[in-house]
Amino acid sequence: MPVRVHVDPDLCIGSAECVRILPEAFRLVKARGVSVATDAAPDAGPQRLDEAVRSCPTGAISVSRSTPGDPDDRH
Ligand code: SF4
């Protein structure tokens, strides 16, 4: 099941909680003061990704899981 991890740069305040919890999945871009998801983020596993989502103080992290034909994919 494809997993997409996204950090909304408009919400992220660069607190780096996500980097502390999942250093392989998130990277702080100091020049921009925000975190980004790495290519390894989808492989971090649902429990740890959920923990990172819960730890984010601004709700900037989103994780979506979808399979072709999911109701979420219909437009
Ligand atoms: S925990 Fe949230 S606000 Fe903090 S750096 Fe990560 S995405 Fe940004």
Image: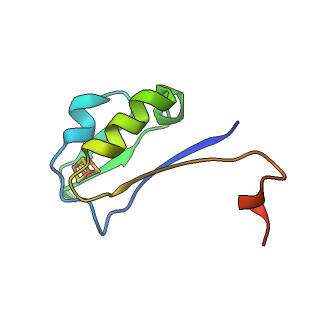
Please report the residue visible at 19 percent of the width from the left and 43 percent of the height from the top: 16
Taking the spot 30% from the left edge, 40% from the top edge, the residue there is: 27
Q: Quadrant of the C terminus?
A: bottom right
Viewer-nearest residue: 41 or 68:
68
What count of labels does the image hold? 0
Q: Please say if 46 is above or below 70.
A: above
The x and y percentages for residue 19 are 25, 36
Image quarter of the N terminus? top right
Residue 43 place in picture, x, y as percent: 53, 27
**What is the residue that sits farthest to the right in this orientation?**
69
As rendered, which of 43 and 34 lies closer to the eye? 43
Viewed as shown, does residue 33 lie left or right of 59? Answer: left
The x, y position of residue 56, in whole percent, is 26, 48
Residue shown at 24%/59% (left/top)? 58
Relative to 60, 20 lies left or right: left
Name the quadrant containing residue 67.
top right
